Amino acid sequence: MVVLATKCYVEGDARDRALDGMGSLVANDVGELSVDWNVGVRDDDFVQVDVNGEDAEVARNVLAETWGEVVAHDGGLEAGEEYVGTLESWDDDGFVLDAGVDVRVPAAEIGLGRGSPEQVVERFGLVQHLPVAFVYGGDVGDPDAEPSRLADAERDRLYDWQRGNGRVDVNSATRGEVRATVNRAGHAQDIVTVERLGLLEQSIVCTENTDPPGLLAAIGSYLPAEMRCVV
């Protein structure tokens, strides 16, 4: 079994479609290995894949490398190690990530320039449930623990978003749904691709001459989801 660092938090038909899509993604990742698998969702909405067969260990490693792995319930987090959690909330004090347990990243340890955590969220187009890599500082009750922080590679990734032509980040929709929405709104020529960030978190990469706020306004009525621009 491997618990992936991505969530399925929609309900009804949308949940069924998302899990069907997740099954296809898992098949793409491990379909050539000698394994059987079953995709499910834990009570905390994290996607869980049960893997059995001759290549089960290899398959679990491939899935963990591709999606990130939630390990907190399997033995806790180790100080100084890098993990992936989902961005659950933010306030004046920092970010709260869900890595099987709540991990607080203080505002001073976000490392994405000046401004409050909310301003950072707006500036970098961050959406709720976005998978985020972090370095765990240690147990809050440990007087010698360091504060948790965003991983260097995560900071680099988000800065790279700002150096590009612009993006519109979306949650609560599959990659196929976002692509179909852009096409329906008549803006297929205005994007480079839709980059998958998680199962239900996507990033629409704009072309050089596309205005991300304008694209958001154009597709917003077609897609009832949280969306933010990276300009």
Image (cartoon, helix red, strand yellow):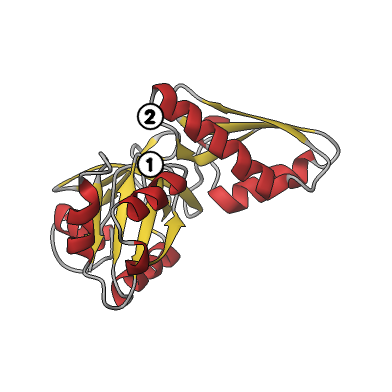
Find the distance from the CA under tag 1 to the CA under tag 2: 9 Å
Circle 1 sits on which residue?
Answer: 173
Position in image of residue 80 (x %, y %): 47, 55
Report the disc number at residue 70: none
Q: Label 1's element?
A: loop
Q: Residue 49, located in which quarter of the rendered image?
A: top right
Specify the amino acid type for callout 1: Ala
Q: Depth check: give the residue in front, 66 or 187.
A: 187
Q: Residue at (20%, 55%) from the top-left corner?
A: 218
Residue situated furthest right in the rendering: 54
Position in image of residue 224 (x %, y %): 25, 39
Against 4, is 184 above or below? below
Q: Label 2's element?
A: loop
Give the position of the N terminus as an image quadrant. Answer: top right
Asked whether disc 1 touches disc 2, contact meaning CB atoms under 8 Å apart, the reply is: no
Quick check: 29 left or right of 188? right
Circle 2 sits on which residue?
Answer: 10
Q: How many numbered tags mark residues here? A: 2
Whether residue 5 is visible to the viewer of this picture, yes or no, is yes
Q: Residues within 10 Å of mark 1 (few under 14, many from 20)?
A: many
Q: Residues within 10 Å of mark 2 (few under 14, many from 20)?
A: some
Position in image of residue 98 (x %, y %): 38, 38
Against 40, is 200 above or below? below
Q: Earlier in the sequence, mark 1 or mark 2?
A: 2
Q: Residue 69, located in which quarter of the rendered image?
A: top right
Whether residue 44 is visible to the viewer of this picture, yes or no, is no
Q: Depth check: give the residue in front, 198 or 149.
A: 198
Give the position of the C terminus as an image quadrant. Answer: bottom left
Specify the amino acid type for callout 2: Val
Position in image of residue 96 (x %, y %): 29, 42
Q: Residue at (30%, 58%) from the top-left corner?
A: 186
Q: Residue at (30%, 75%) from the top-left corner?
A: 165
